[in-house]
Image (tube, grey):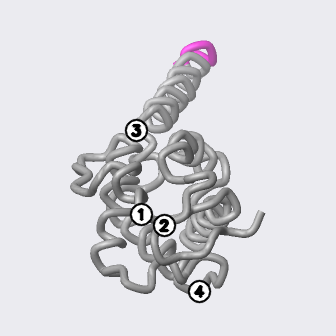
Amino acid sequence: MKLYNWFLLGLRAVVLTCAMAVAHASGTLYEQIGGEAKFRAIAQEFTNAILADDRINFTFADADVKKFTQLIFEQLCNLTGGPCKYTGRDMHEAHAKLAINNAQFNAIAEDLYIAFDRVHVPYRLQNKVMVMLAPMQRDIVKPGFVAPGTTPPPR
């Protein structure tokens, strides 16, 4: 085989390899992060981080932690293009009776970053998920709202 033919064969292999890498990277964000097992681990680590976080763990005092973890899995899976259906309430309804302020919302975001780091999700993919979650802040944070039986958050 002539050198030229070897060169073309090698070039085709490189092009095919690059095309396969692009096709893999262009899958859903759910697939890029690692699928079901990875998202279940993220949900569990997120729950663990929240429960260890004194800035916000009191808001989960009466929560069904197992159900919460499942709903977080479903929500992240669905949001990132996975095959899951989110079965929980919408964010406005789920947080209507809670006096969540911006500091608490930001604490939850930090805890999600902690969970992503613990299961080795690349930072660029973490940020893609966070961009998808950010609009939920307007449904979760209740400026000036004080739930019955609670004290107003500090300003």
In magenta, the rendered stretch is 1-5
Point out which mark residue 147 bears. Answer: 2
Q: Residues within 10 Å of mark 1 (few under 14, many from 20)?
A: few
Q: Name the side, left or right, on which 70 lies relative to 130.
A: left
Instruction: Pick the residue in front: 77 or 148.
Output: 148
Distance Cα–Cα, label 1 vs label 2: 5 Å
Point out which mark residue 97 bears. Answer: 1
Q: Residues within 10 Å of mark 3 (few under 14, many from 20)?
A: some
User: Which structural element holds mark 2?
Assistant: loop
Residue identified by numbered label 3: 28
Q: Residue at x 61, y 69 (%)?
A: 111
Instruction: Pick the residue in front: 88 or 119.
Output: 88
Specify whether residue 46 is painted magenta. no
Residue type beneath disc 1: Lys
User: How many numbered tags mark residues here?
Assistant: 4
Instruction: Say if 2 sits above or below 107 in the image.
Output: above
Question: Is the C-beta separation of discs 1 and 2 under 8 Å?
Answer: yes
Q: Earlier in the sequence, mark 1 or mark 2?
A: 1
Q: Name the side, left or right, on which 129 lies relative to 29.
A: right
Residue 106 x %, y %: 67, 60
Point out which mark residue 52 bears. Answer: 4
Location of the C terminus (image quadrant): bottom right
Distance Cα–Cα, label 4 vs label 2: 23 Å
Of tags 2 and 3, the one toward the viewer is 2
Distance Cα–Cα, label 2 vs label 3: 39 Å
Of tags 1 and 4, the one toward the viewer is 1
Magenta segment main secondary structure: helix
Q: Residue at x 54, y 39 (%)?
A: 135
Question: Is the C-beta separation of discs 2 and 3 under 8 Å?
Answer: no
